[in-house]
Amino acid sequence: METGIAIWGELITILVMAVALGFDAFSLGLGIGMKGIRVREIIKIGAVVAIFHILMPLAGLYMGRYLGALLGNVATLAAGGLLLLLGGHMIYSSLRGDAVQSINYRSSWAIVLFSLSVSIDSFSVGVSLGMFPINLWLTILSFGLCGGIMSILGLMLGSQVSHRLSEYGEAFGGVILFTFGVLFIL
Protein backbone atom coordinates (compact mmCIF):
# COMPACT_ATOMS: atom_id res chain seq x y z
CA MET A 1 0.00 0.00 0.00
CA GLU A 2 2.81 2.41 0.79
CA THR A 3 4.35 1.79 -2.65
CA GLY A 4 1.03 2.62 -4.36
CA ILE A 5 0.79 5.90 -2.48
CA ALA A 6 4.38 6.75 -3.46
CA ILE A 7 3.64 6.04 -7.14
CA TRP A 8 0.52 8.23 -7.07
CA GLY A 9 2.43 10.94 -5.24
CA GLU A 10 5.18 10.88 -7.88
CA LEU A 11 2.61 10.94 -10.69
CA ILE A 12 0.72 13.89 -9.23
CA THR A 13 3.95 15.78 -8.53
CA ILE A 14 5.21 15.28 -12.10
CA LEU A 15 1.86 16.31 -13.60
CA VAL A 16 1.68 19.45 -11.47
CA MET A 17 5.22 20.37 -12.53
CA ALA A 18 4.41 19.65 -16.18
CA VAL A 19 1.34 21.90 -16.08
CA ALA A 20 3.25 24.65 -14.26
CA LEU A 21 6.02 24.53 -16.88
CA GLY A 22 3.41 24.49 -19.64
CA PHE A 23 1.87 27.76 -18.45
CA ASP A 24 4.82 29.69 -19.89
CA ALA A 25 4.17 28.08 -23.25
CA PHE A 26 0.44 28.83 -22.95
CA SER A 27 0.93 32.48 -22.00
CA LEU A 28 3.54 33.18 -24.61
CA GLY A 29 1.54 31.24 -27.20
CA LEU A 30 -1.35 33.55 -26.40
CA GLY A 31 0.85 36.54 -27.19
CA ILE A 32 2.17 35.04 -30.44
CA GLY A 33 -1.31 33.89 -31.48
CA MET A 34 -2.63 37.44 -31.23
CA LYS A 35 -0.37 38.36 -34.12
CA GLY A 36 -2.52 36.07 -36.27
CA ILE A 37 -1.43 32.54 -37.07
CA ARG A 38 -2.66 29.62 -39.15
CA VAL A 39 -3.54 26.17 -37.83
CA ARG A 40 -0.59 24.53 -39.60
CA GLU A 41 1.83 26.94 -37.88
CA ILE A 42 0.11 26.40 -34.52
CA ILE A 43 0.70 22.66 -34.80
CA LYS A 44 4.30 23.18 -35.95
CA ILE A 45 5.09 25.53 -33.05
CA GLY A 46 3.32 23.22 -30.57
CA ALA A 47 5.40 20.26 -31.77
CA VAL A 48 8.68 22.18 -31.47
CA VAL A 49 7.72 23.42 -27.98
CA ALA A 50 6.91 19.82 -26.99
CA ILE A 51 10.32 18.65 -28.24
CA PHE A 52 12.08 21.41 -26.30
CA HIS A 53 10.03 20.55 -23.19
CA ILE A 54 11.46 17.04 -23.52
CA LEU A 55 15.05 17.95 -24.42
CA MET A 56 15.58 20.72 -21.85
CA PRO A 57 14.69 18.68 -18.74
CA LEU A 58 16.71 15.78 -20.16
CA ALA A 59 19.68 18.09 -20.57
CA GLY A 60 19.10 19.36 -17.04
CA LEU A 61 18.94 15.85 -15.66
CA TYR A 62 22.23 14.94 -17.28
CA MET A 63 24.06 18.22 -16.75
CA GLY A 64 23.78 17.95 -13.01
CA ARG A 65 23.44 20.07 -9.99
CA TYR A 66 26.60 22.16 -10.28
CA LEU A 67 26.02 23.40 -13.82
CA GLY A 68 22.39 24.22 -13.10
CA ALA A 69 23.31 26.32 -10.09
CA LEU A 70 26.00 28.07 -12.11
CA LEU A 71 23.87 28.90 -15.18
CA GLY A 72 20.33 28.93 -13.79
CA ASN A 73 20.06 32.69 -13.27
CA VAL A 74 21.96 33.54 -16.45
CA ALA A 75 19.66 31.36 -18.56
CA THR A 76 16.56 32.93 -17.02
CA LEU A 77 17.90 36.43 -17.63
CA ALA A 78 18.70 35.55 -21.25
CA ALA A 79 15.17 34.20 -21.77
CA GLY A 80 13.72 37.36 -20.19
CA GLY A 81 15.85 39.59 -22.39
CA LEU A 82 14.76 37.70 -25.49
CA LEU A 83 11.10 38.08 -24.55
CA LEU A 84 11.60 41.81 -23.89
CA LEU A 85 13.08 42.22 -27.36
CA LEU A 86 10.38 40.17 -29.08
CA GLY A 87 7.55 41.89 -27.20
CA GLY A 88 9.03 45.35 -27.68
CA HIS A 89 9.46 44.75 -31.39
CA MET A 90 5.87 43.54 -31.73
CA ILE A 91 4.56 46.64 -29.94
CA TYR A 92 6.75 48.94 -32.03
CA SER A 93 5.86 47.32 -35.34
CA SER A 94 2.12 47.39 -34.56
CA LEU A 95 2.25 51.09 -33.68
CA ARG A 96 4.34 51.98 -36.75
CA GLY A 97 2.24 49.90 -39.12
CA ASP A 98 3.85 48.81 -42.38
CA ALA A 99 6.93 50.99 -41.83
CA VAL A 100 8.61 48.31 -39.70
CA GLN A 101 9.26 44.70 -40.66
CA SER A 102 7.63 42.54 -38.00
CA ILE A 103 9.18 39.37 -36.62
CA ASN A 104 8.22 36.43 -38.81
CA TYR A 105 7.00 33.73 -36.44
CA ARG A 106 6.75 31.36 -39.36
CA SER A 107 10.53 31.14 -39.71
CA SER A 108 12.32 28.16 -38.23
CA TRP A 109 14.71 30.40 -36.30
CA ALA A 110 11.86 32.30 -34.61
CA ILE A 111 10.09 29.05 -33.70
CA VAL A 112 13.29 27.69 -32.13
CA LEU A 113 13.82 30.94 -30.17
CA PHE A 114 10.23 30.92 -28.96
CA SER A 115 10.46 27.26 -27.96
CA LEU A 116 13.77 27.78 -26.19
CA SER A 117 12.48 30.80 -24.29
CA VAL A 118 9.49 28.88 -22.90
CA SER A 119 11.59 25.79 -22.12
CA ILE A 120 14.49 27.35 -20.21
CA ASP A 121 12.85 26.73 -16.85
CA SER A 122 12.45 23.05 -17.77
CA PHE A 123 16.23 22.79 -17.72
CA SER A 124 16.39 24.00 -14.10
CA VAL A 125 13.59 21.66 -13.10
CA GLY A 126 15.46 18.81 -14.79
CA VAL A 127 18.57 19.62 -12.78
CA SER A 128 16.55 19.55 -9.57
CA LEU A 129 14.81 16.32 -10.50
CA GLY A 130 18.17 14.75 -11.30
CA MET A 131 18.87 14.58 -7.57
CA PHE A 132 15.91 12.27 -6.97
CA PRO A 133 15.03 8.82 -8.25
CA ILE A 134 12.25 9.52 -10.76
CA ASN A 135 10.55 7.75 -13.61
CA LEU A 136 12.46 9.37 -16.49
CA TRP A 137 10.05 8.48 -19.30
CA LEU A 138 6.96 9.55 -17.37
CA THR A 139 8.62 12.84 -16.47
CA ILE A 140 9.90 13.89 -19.88
CA LEU A 141 6.79 12.72 -21.75
CA SER A 142 4.55 14.58 -19.29
CA PHE A 143 6.61 17.74 -19.68
CA GLY A 144 6.60 17.43 -23.47
CA LEU A 145 2.88 16.71 -23.80
CA CYS A 146 1.84 19.48 -21.43
CA GLY A 147 4.20 22.01 -23.02
CA GLY A 148 3.04 21.17 -26.54
CA ILE A 149 -0.67 21.03 -25.75
CA MET A 150 -0.62 24.20 -23.67
CA SER A 151 1.28 26.13 -26.35
CA ILE A 152 -1.25 25.00 -28.96
CA LEU A 153 -4.12 26.08 -26.70
CA GLY A 154 -2.49 29.47 -26.13
CA LEU A 155 -1.80 29.98 -29.83
CA MET A 156 -5.37 29.02 -30.74
CA LEU A 157 -6.90 31.27 -28.10
CA GLY A 158 -4.61 34.15 -29.09
CA SER A 159 -5.54 33.67 -32.73
CA GLN A 160 -9.26 33.85 -31.89
CA VAL A 161 -8.78 36.93 -29.74
CA SER A 162 -6.73 38.64 -32.48
CA HIS A 163 -9.67 38.43 -34.88
CA ARG A 164 -11.73 40.42 -32.41
CA LEU A 165 -8.99 42.94 -31.59
CA SER A 166 -8.05 43.55 -35.24
CA GLU A 167 -5.02 45.85 -35.53
CA TYR A 168 -4.46 45.97 -31.76
CA GLY A 169 -3.92 42.20 -31.53
CA GLU A 170 -0.22 42.38 -32.33
CA ALA A 171 0.35 45.22 -29.84
CA PHE A 172 -1.52 43.35 -27.11
CA GLY A 173 0.45 40.18 -27.86
CA GLY A 174 3.66 42.22 -27.65
CA VAL A 175 2.58 43.58 -24.26
CA ILE A 176 2.08 40.00 -23.03
CA LEU A 177 5.53 38.93 -24.25
CA PHE A 178 7.15 42.07 -22.85
CA THR A 179 5.47 41.53 -19.47
CA PHE A 180 6.72 37.96 -19.27
CA GLY A 181 10.20 39.17 -20.17
CA VAL A 182 10.09 41.61 -17.24
CA LEU A 183 8.82 38.85 -14.93
CA PHE A 184 11.64 36.52 -16.04
CA ILE A 185 14.25 39.20 -15.27
CA LEU A 186 12.79 40.16 -11.92
Image: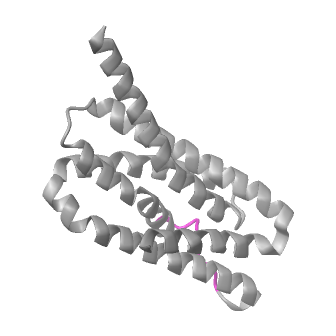
Q: Residue at x 81, y 75 (%)?
A: 167
Query: Closest to the observer: 51 or 13?
Result: 13
Res 155 seen here: yes
Which quadrant: the C terminus? bottom left
- Image vertical order of residue 155 relative to residue 177, above or below: above
Q: Quadrant of residue 32?
A: bottom right
Q: Residue at x 28, y 64 (%)?
A: 72
Residue at the image position 39 percent from the left and 52 percent from the top: 52
The image shows residue 112 at horizontal and vertical percentages of: 44, 63
* Residue 182 vertical placement versus 27 (above, below): below
Q: Nearest the camera: 52 or 124?
A: 124
Q: Residue furthest top?
A: 1
Residue 103 highlighted magenta (yes or no): yes
Residue 125, position as x, y percentages in the image:
32, 49
Which residues, given as a range, are shown in magenta?
101-108
In which quadrant of the rendered image does the N terminus lie? Answer: top left
Q: How is the image coloured?
A: one colour
